[in-house]
């Protein structure tokens, strides 16, 4: 009997993991997210010891993370043991994050009852998704709302709620499905009033987002005194490991710059106004290499073409001003930070606009809270161009005076932070540029997931998205989330398209994660109520005994 019971629990855990993973890109099966949590919530009703529940839930979440994020440690290519170590740490850590909302749910269930806990569960889950996007340990890749990027007809309302509105909608559908299963268990037939009411509610709620007014085509290209811009995306498809190795000398860096300049000259035939290169495309720290900066600026002026490119931005500190996590030049007192950065060169201008990456991948790009625990830095410093990047502080919005436009440019992982992106739009960004590498992980789901998530940023802010990846996938996405153009993985490509800067702000661009904050407040009230109920029961029991 115990063996059968264990098998049932294991089956529910595995069922959740499979449904959860299949709902994420690259699978166009986002509808599965509407029922993926049903096995998990049924599992929470099974009688188990705390230890057994912990092990079962951890196993469920570990499998869900593994199936969805199997690519994160570069296990398929296995070129760098430290990157694999970071991937293993992430896969071990991720289930603990998922256990937190389940712990709150269990607390509410124990003290306020199962029905109250189920009603509160959507608020609890979304609250923890939102909290997980804060701080330096954040990795909100598995936000359940991210599953809906192929369902364009159902995601248009996130211009108000952001992606957490999608998460709320999906978890509510899961909870209603549990209530429907409860009705069937209690003997209600499919045709009974209760089953009909619950089934009808699920059906209407699932269809409801499709009724949100579509963003009109004429608004996609509305000018508002701005002019269409021809954008050229250059996908060089360089091996990210060989690129750093070949760029250890100035000669190697020059060869790579020659290649990019040649590609930019090809774009001129298509009347491109702005060329976009991927993350760390240029290996020179240009501000400290004036001859290379002058060469690149001369090419920008000659072609009359702006240039967005990733590069390593090296900054040296005066004595006493260096952060504790900064590096030092061996044999000297000179301290510095290297930032994963973006520059923008505008034709006819001597200015170099720079943005230093502000959201860094935990462990893979920087040890979380390294400034507070600097003793961790030295033993974990790697030599593949990653792991101890400096933490950027200035939220730069790039300005092109000649084109009369403003835009944001962000690097890789930053594009999965919805409110972070919206804050730049609220400050005037009229279109979005995301540059990334996406070649570290091999030909896996990682790059495909990353590309699809950009759809959400386009719809939330009603902005064109220009996405440039070293090895793919590069794309151009319109404000309705439609992928107008895209490249294939691991191909050298030049993608040219026309975008339209937009100045109108959505509710989400202006107010950010307001919905998530309201849900967090409700969660706090429910948790406090459950704690208060527990204290009341203990006092009552104590008085009775007294």
Image (tube, helix red, strand yellow):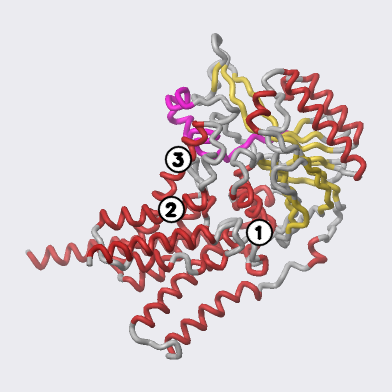
- Where does the image place residue 195, in percent across and percent down from the top left? 44, 85
Q: Between residues 457 and 31, which one lies in front from this camera angle?
A: 31
For the residue carrying disc 3, how many other residues have a C-alpha within 10 Å: few (<14), some (14-19), or many (20+)? some
Q: Quadrant of residue 216?
A: bottom right
For the residue carrying disc 2, how many other residues have a C-alpha within 10 Å: few (<14), some (14-19), or many (20+)? many
At 65% from the left and 26% from the top, the residue drawn is 244
Q: Element type at marker 2?
A: helix
Q: Is label 3 or label 1 in front?
A: 3
In the picture as drawn, the residue positioned furthest to the left comes out as 546
At 80% from the left and 30% from the top, the residue drawn is 259
The answer to which of marks 3 and 1 sits earlier in the sequence is 3
Q: Element type at marker 3?
A: helix
- Where does the image place residue 325, in percent across and percent down from the top left? 50, 26
Task: Look at the magenta stretch and give its main secondary structure.
Answer: loop
- Where does the image place residue 480, in percent across and percent down from the top left? 72, 62
Q: Which mark is residue 88?
A: 3
Between marks 3 and 1, how big is the CA–CA gap? 32 Å
At 46% from the left and 55% from the top, the residue drawn is 64
Q: Which residue is mark 2?
A: 63
Whether residues under marks 2 and 3 lie with C-beta atoms below 8 angstroms apart, the answer is no
Q: Between residues 263 and 368, which one lies in front from this camera angle?
A: 263
Q: Quadrant of residue 162?
A: bottom right
For the residue carrying disc 1, how many other residues have a C-alpha within 10 Å: few (<14), some (14-19), or many (20+)? many
Between marks 2 and 1, how big is the CA–CA gap? 30 Å
Is residue 108 something one can see in this rendering?
no
Q: Is residue 119 left or right of residue 29?
A: left
- Where does the image place residue 333, in percent across and percent down from the top left? 55, 12
In the picture as drawn, the residue positioned furthest to the top comes out as 331
Q: Which residue is mark 1?
A: 460
Which stretch appears magenta?
Answer: 354-380
Q: Element type at marker 1?
A: helix
């Amino acid at each position: 009997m115990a063996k059968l019971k264990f098998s049932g629990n294991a089956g529910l855990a595995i069922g959740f993991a499979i449904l959860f993973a299949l709902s994420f890109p690259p699978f166009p099966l986002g509808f599965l997210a509407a029922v993926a949590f049903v096995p998990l919530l049924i599992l929470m009703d099974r009688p188990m010891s705390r230890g057994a529940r912990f092990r079962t839930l951890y196993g469920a979440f570990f499998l869900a993370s593994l199936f969805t994020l199997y690519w994160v440690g570069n296990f398929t290519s296995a070129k760098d043991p430290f990157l694999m170590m970071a991937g293993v740490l992430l896969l071990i850590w991720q289930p603990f994050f998922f256990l937190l909302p389940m712990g709150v749910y269990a607390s509410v269930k124990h003290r306020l009852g199962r029905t109250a806990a189920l009603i509160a569960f959507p608020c609890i889950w979304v609250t923890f998704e939102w909290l997980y996007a804060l701080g330096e340990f954040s990795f909100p890749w598995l936000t359940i709302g991210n599953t809906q990027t192929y369902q364009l007809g159902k995601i248009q309302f996130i211009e108000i709620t952001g992606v957490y509105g999608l998460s709320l909608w999906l978890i509510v559908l899961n909870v209603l499905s549990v209530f429907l299963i409860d009705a069937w268990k209690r003997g209600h037939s499919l045709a009974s009033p209760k089953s009909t009411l619950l089934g009808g509610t699920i059906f209407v709620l699932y269809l409801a987002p499709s009724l949100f007014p579509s963003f009109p085509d004429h608004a996609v290209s509305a000018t508002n005194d701005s002019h269409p811009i021809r954008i050229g995306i250059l996908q060089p498809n360089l091996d990210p490991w060989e690129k750093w190795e070949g760029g250890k000398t100035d000669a190697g860096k020059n060869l790579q710059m020659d290649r990019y300049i040649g590609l930019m000259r090809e774009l001129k035939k298509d009347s491109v106004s702005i060329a976009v290169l991927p993350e760390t495309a240029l290996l020179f720290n240009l501000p400290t290499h004036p001859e290379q900066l002058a060469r690149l600026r001369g090419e920008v002026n000659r072609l009359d073409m702006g240039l967005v490119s990733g590069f390593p931005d090296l900054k040296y500190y005066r004595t006493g001003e260096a952060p504790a996590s900064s590096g030092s030049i061996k044999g000297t007192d000179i301290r510095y930070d290297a930032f994963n950065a973006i520059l923008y060169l505008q034709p006819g201008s001597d200015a170099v606009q720079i943005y230093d990456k502000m959201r860094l991948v935990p462990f893979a790009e920087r040890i979380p809270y390294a400034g507070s625990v600097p003793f961790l830095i030295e033993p974990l410093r790697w030599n593949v161009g990653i792991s101890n990047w400096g933490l950027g502080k200035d939220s730069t919005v790039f300005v092109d005076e000649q084109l009369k436009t403003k835009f944001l440019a962000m690097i890789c992982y930053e594009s999965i932070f919805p409110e972070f992106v919206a804050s730049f739009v609220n400050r005037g960004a009229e279109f979005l540029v995301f540059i990334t590498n996406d070649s570290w992980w091999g030909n896996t789901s990682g790059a495909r997931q990353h590309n699809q998530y950009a759809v959400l940023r386009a719809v939330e802010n009603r902005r064109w998205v220009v996405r440039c990846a070293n090895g793919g996938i590069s794309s151009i996405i319109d404000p309705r989330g439609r992928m107008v153009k895209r490249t294939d993985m691991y191909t050298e490509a030049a993608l040219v398209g026309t975008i339209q800067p937009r100045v109108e702000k959505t509710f989400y661009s202006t107010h950010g994660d307001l919905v998530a904050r309201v849900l967090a407040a409700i969660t706090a009230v429910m948790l406090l109520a459950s704690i208060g109920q527990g204290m009341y029961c203990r006092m009552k029991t104590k008085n009775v005994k007294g």
